[in-house]
Image (cartoon, helix red, strand yellow):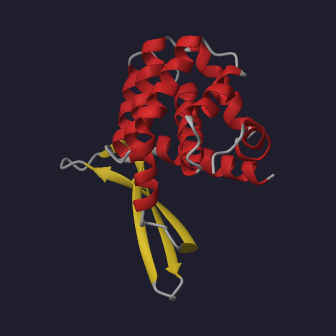
Amino acid sequence: PALNFSQMDSSIISDTVLSSLSQSSSLDLGTFNALVVIVSKMLCREEKYLVSEVRVKKLVEEGGDEALLTSLHSSLTCLLTLLSSQNSPPDVLTQLLEDLPLPPSHITSLVSTYTSSLPLIRSGLTNTTTFANRRLINFAWRLDYRVRSSGASMNEPVFLCNFRTVDNEGVEREEEIECGIAGVKDMLFKVGQAGEVLK
């Protein structure tokens, strides 16, 4: 069933996400649209997370505020995932956004993208098998450096994150992802948002 606004506001969408979304009013419409498309393509499984991360970095290189864009990327991901998982209609999103200090053009952009992407996002959530019916039993990470052929290390470190999961039948599986500093920060931010939802 679709969530009503009061349920979302009180127990599903955290104050951290709402506060972050409010900051998007400082973005011009073009940058905001670009960020919404980046998140949408990632959630629709049209692009991988690492591609999404690269696209956000490009917006930063074009003059965007890195902290703001990273925070908004996480908040939009969290918001659209939660709404889609409940199959919430677009008017629920509209009502939520209208209570924030956002320009009407930003609201129209996000609601329009959510409306057109909802079926694909839900399909992606349904077909996600990495952790479906599985529980996390261990997490480990290590820091690596890419080495050029000349032997000089790259400027940016690479984190290798290993997740060990087990299914209902006791079968264990390992999943390893690779991400840069921005990716690790984003992951920590999202874990923090998950903690906020549980409060």
Q: Residue furthest front?
A: 1
Q: As displayed, is residue 28 above or below residue 148?
A: above
Q: In the rendered image, which quarter is residue 42 located in?
A: top left
Q: In the rendered image, which quarter is residue 98 located in?
A: top right
Q: As displayed, is residue 128 above or below residue 33?
A: below
At horizontal 49% and vertical 67% (from top left) the residue drawn is 131
- Image location (x, y in percent) of residue 149: 18, 50
Of residues 152 and 195, the one nearer the viewer is 195
- Image location (x, y in percent) of residue 63: 44, 15
Of residues 184 and 78, the one nearer the viewer is 78
- Image location (x, y in percent) of residue 168: 54, 83
At horizontal 36% and vertical 36% (from top left) the residue drawn is 54
| Count of numbered labels shown in the rendering | 0
Of residues 27 and 12, the one nearer the viewer is 12
Q: As displayed, is residue 50 above or below residue 35?
A: below
Q: Is residue 48 left or right of residue 136?
A: left
Q: Residue furthest left?
A: 149
Q: Is residue 196 visible?
A: yes
- Image location (x, y in percent) of residue 29: 48, 13
Q: As displayed, is residue 60 above or below residue 10?
A: above
Q: Is residue 43 visible?
A: no
Q: Is residue 31 left or right of residue 193?
A: left
